[in-house]
Amino acid sequence: MTHLIHSSLRMSFAHVGQRFFQIVAFCTATLLLSAAHAANVFQGATVTDTCVSCPTDKFGAPGTVVDGDLATLRNLGAGAPGAFTITVAKPVSLNKVLVVPAMTPNGAVSFEVQTSKDAAGVAGSWTSHGGILTKEWSDRVPVEVVMNPETVDVRAVRLTVHKSPSWIAIYEIEGESNLGKWVYGVAILAALLLVGGLVYSRRRRASTV
């Protein structure tokens, strides 16, 4: 009788342990996948630009370039030069910056992306990524700038347009964190653990029948 009780208790604890393992693995995978999809680390950041006389009712608010909405834009009211400065609340790591221009007409644009580990962006703290670049900008077509290796602890990002065939106007500026790759890896591992736990549970139940 005692043996049967101990056996029953072991099975009960094993079952509870398996279910707990499955729930933890499932929740971990879900949360990590959600974090991986939230790739734009600039969304909700503070934005300033070089246009001091651009009323928001006509030219949009500076913050529209990081609101995640392609239906809104910020126009600097003139051609180059012009710049946007994005300040994030906490240090971020960056893999690339995507710019979605609002362009009429399209054409070659000379621009530069710089980062600073200082939230105030003091002189001498900026690092350029590729120097002044010249690429074709087209309306609503994302322009990608890859960051230098190990771009970490970034507090401010500055996009400067030096030459442009049209007024400077931007739909979105997005920052992709270089943490995304390991987040996906951990999420996949958690998913594999979940599947492994389910397989083990079924085999364990089959062996006790």
Image (cartoon, rainbow, N blue to C red):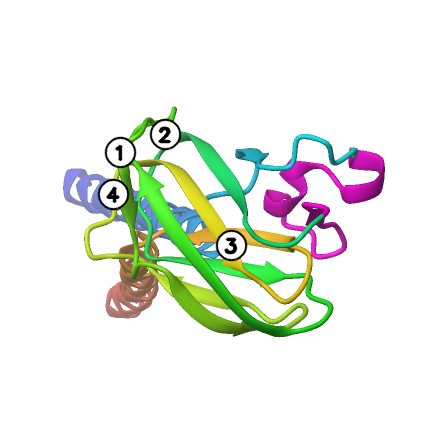
The residue that label 1 is drawn on is: 125
Q: Tags 2 and 1 in contact by the CB under 8 Å rule? A: yes
Relative to residue 103, is residue 34 drawn left or right? left
Element at label 2: loop
CA–CA distance in space, label 3 to label 4: 24 Å
For disc 1, the neighbor class at 10 Å (few under 14, some 14 to 19, many from 20) is some
The residue at the point 31 percent across, 28 percent down is: 118
Relative to residue 200, is residue 57 drawn left or right? right
Lower position in the chain sequence, tag 2 or tag 3: 2
Lower position in the chain sequence, tag 2 or tag 4: 2
Q: Tags 4 and 1 in contact by the CB under 8 Å rule? A: no
The residue that label 3 is drawn on is: 161
In the displayed structure, would residue 109 be above or below residue 170? below
For disc 3, the neighbor class at 10 Å (few under 14, some 14 to 19, many from 20) is many
Amino acid at dot 2: Gly
Amino acid at dot 4: Val
Foreground residue, 41 or 28?
Answer: 41
Foreground residue, 3 or 72?
Answer: 72
Lower position in the chain sequence, tag 4 or tag 1: 1
Q: Quadrant of the N terminus?
A: top left
In the displayed structure, would residue 150 be above or below residue 181? above
The residue at the point 29 percent across, 61 percent down is: 130
CA–CA distance in space, label 2 to label 4: 15 Å
For disc 4, the neighbor class at 10 Å (few under 14, some 14 to 19, many from 20) is some
The residue that label 2 is drawn on is: 121
Coordinates of residue 83 in the picture (x, y in percent): 53, 44
On the image, which quarter does residue 51 sit in? top right
Q: Report the magenta residues as a range.
A: 56-77
Element at label 1: loop
Element at label 3: strand
